[in-house]
Amino acid sequence: MTLAIANVCNEIAAISVTGVDIRDIDEIKEELGGRDTPCLMPKPDGFITDFNVERDSFGAAAAARKTVTYTLNYTYLHAPLASGRGLFDVYDQMVTKSFAILDAIIAKDSTIAAELVPADALAYGPVVDPAGEAYHGCIISVQVTEFVN
């Protein structure tokens, strides 16, 4: 049994959304400085949540079929809060880009034995990069279901 989390993250990082820099787990920057936005990157604090393993067949632990589910949480950083632009100056673009990301995730044909589905409601508002700088943005959560044996 091998979980494919690295492959799942690679697949998400490989989606293409015009004007959005989508980062893999090895591409998290501590500080963006506004020049790298809009950006979608793994949320360093709480990236993997809701991990669950369900056995689907009998047999030895390594051979039994299982369904593994977990949620990957990404931070969408649209524009710096301190950029002089108010929330409503960037709101339309922020919503449009975040939904383009969701569309790309929904449309992604996985090359591994996993399903990727956007999860949870988007809560727009201030989000922070790993350095603590505030941005207009939201958290985008992806529910992953892996079928392993």
Image (tube, rainbow, N blue to C red):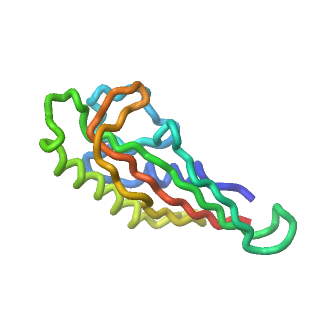
Q: Quadrant of residue 2?
A: bottom right
Q: Image check: 130 left or right of 64?
A: left
In terms of depth relative to the viewer, which is nearer, 15 or 144? 144
Image quarter where the N terminus lies is bottom right
Q: Image check: 54 left or right of 37?
A: right
Residue 31 vs 146, above or below: the answer is above
Q: At 44% from the left edge and 49% from the top edge, which residue is drawn?
A: 13
Image quarter where the C terminus lies is bottom right
Q: Image check: 2 left or right of 46?
A: right
Q: Residue 39's spot in the image, x, y percent?
A: 33, 41
Q: At 77% from the left edge and 74% from the top edge, which residue is drawn?
A: 57
Instruction: Check the image and name the residue furthest to the bottom.
Output: 57
Instruction: Check the image and name the residue furthest to the right.
Output: 60
Q: Quadrant of residue 145?
A: bottom right
Q: Quadrant of residue 147?
A: bottom right
Q: Residue 125's spot in the image, x, y percent?
A: 28, 42
Number of labels in the image equals 0
Q: Image check: 29 left or right of 86?
A: right
Q: At 44% from the left edge and 60% from the top edge, which residue is drawn?
A: 119
Q: Residue 99's spot in the image, x, y percent?
A: 29, 58
Q: At 39% from the left edge and 54% from the top edge, which residue is drawn?
A: 15
Q: Residue 45's spot in the image, x, y percent?
A: 51, 37
